[in-house]
Amino acid sequence: MAQVPQTFFDALAVRTWCGLALETLGRAREEIDAINVYPVADGDTGTNLYLTVESTVAAVEAVFAGHAAGSGPEGPTLADAARAMAHGALIGARGNSGTILAQLLRGMAQVLAEDDPAHADGQGLRLALRQAADSARRAVAHPVEGTVLTVASAAADAADGARGDCGTVARAAYDGARAALAATPGQLPVLERAGVVDAGGRGLVAVLGALVETFTGERARGAAGSAGTGPSRGPHARVGPAAGPVVDGALEECADGAAAVPGQEGPAFEVIYLLEAEDRAVERLRERLDALGDSLVVVGGDGLWNVHVHVDDAGAAVEAGIEAGRPHRIRITHFGAGDVHTTGAERPPRERAQRAVVAVVPGEGLAGLYTEAGATTVLARPGEPPASGELVQAVRRAHAREVVLLPNDADLRHTAAAAAEQVRTEGIRVALIPTRSAVQGIAALAVHEPDRRFDEDVVSMTSAAGATRYAEVTVAERQSWTMAGICQAGDVLGLIDGDVAVIGSDVAETAETVLDRMLSAGGEMVTLVLGDAVPDAVAEHLEGRVREGYLAVDTVVYRGGRQGALLLIGVE
């Protein structure tokens, strides 16, 4: 991480702030989850904010890495870093609060990137904070006071009255946000009944505390993990009758850590998706979704939006997105029978399973296949690999004492290892099998037997994955040198075990050549996973080739959906 303090708001300050915000939310995540009662008492606001900022950090780091790999000495500009910050938050936004935070960061980026300045001073930061608060409020269909929106507005108001450098403005915004957070229970009855401050607002205070540290080099008083009397400084922040927030461990909690709030009711599903659409279509979408449910937040712009809504008819919410444009990264969460959101009743504790499998999969079709086989899945969209926080959440969602983790991508091995290390500290036994393709994961899952001893099961799954050669057929995006020679943009590439082995012009012919090379070393089973763009005729052609040329070799075909490669091939 860059050195602190930073003098001006430049690209390095953006990078530093994002990194410090992630660290701060990491320390505060469990505390924020525990006080999450609005709009849904599902105990995940802190985690959602952490995952949102983790995506933000990844986007900003990618910009710096891209400039470092270039030939010029110049690093990214403030505009480059600010836009990356906003984009990373937008595509990685989780939950209601994460979606609003994404719009807050987008609002700041609109000011910081305007006219491409070298850096912003205290005045620029004041304007950015004001734009952030105003744009976030506009993004929410029905703003409610006593929430993160109130805290954001108070931060901007306090910053407006500050004069000085970025550190002075950041500290004023932080102090204003803390005061507003402490007052949230008096504005929102559900918070007062539960005896907590707003969880989303608490998260924003943590993010603003990181902004103070960026420009002063000192951790803000009351920030997560530091000394001080912040609005929520302990495991559960409760509000006394007149003395303000105090720490009290007596907060009633549900099994997942969410505070129980009697009488809270609402829709059964949370629906979130990224949407590629024009502004006019999004305005119509807002109206339709507003009629379908509540907690509607639509953030973004320039053709890319993040949509969040709570509804009873999840299918209708997705269909509305399809009518408006092209939705992807669709996430549907069922609050569940007995959830405090739908009944107000505390859910009984759920017994942990003995063993579970968590797998990263590249398309909806394979996600369904893995789920049918009993695995908990994490969907990896093309160009959007999951962060370690998503894998941690998936392991927790599996709710098992022992977990086998299948990254199914060589590039995700370190991410998966970091996730495994984190959940081990929570007492979960995790084995990471270094699968490099989804077809290796299929082979491992096929021999999985939860009734075996854990070590024996892991050895068997590892052996099956290792015995499966993998290949993929894809299209070259640009001219480049490969192990098979120089390819041009648009060429069809056949990769075997990660290396380009065949360069062709036809998908079926290239796939056949790849398959022949793989089967020349023997094999008993061929697995084909077709992407959306590949017709069934290609699979029929390859199945015929195996029948005619390789006796006693079986073939199984799956539809993978929207995945990065045109075709995945596995040979066991």
Image (spheres, rainbow, N blue to C red):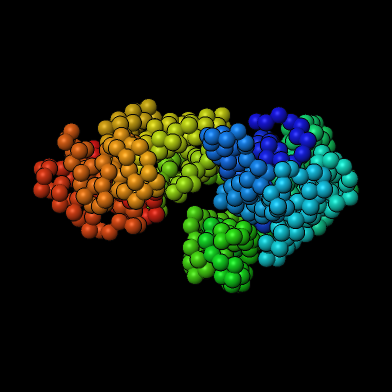
**Residue 176: x percent and y percent?**
84, 47
- For this rendering, which residue is in front, 35 or 175? 175
Residue in the image at 36% along x and 48% along y: 489
Left/right of residue 287 with respect to residue 328 in the rendered view: right
Rendering quarter of residue 466: top left
**In which quadrant will I find the N terminus?**
top right
- For this rendering, which residue is in front, 320 or 429? 320
Residue 112 vertical position relative to residue 304 in the rendered view, above or below: above
Whether residue 405 is visible = no
Whether residue 305 is visible = yes
- For this rendering, which residue is in front, 47 or 336? 47
Residue 534 vertical position relative to residue 398 in the rendered view, above or below: below
**Residue 130: x percent and y percent?**
78, 54
Rendering quarter of residue 233: top right
Left/right of residue 316 with respect to residue 548 in the rendered view: right
Residue in the image at 78% along x and 35% along y: 7
Residue in the image at 59% along x and 50% along y: 87
**Residue 158: x percent and y percent?**
85, 50
Residue furthest toward the front?
Answer: 72
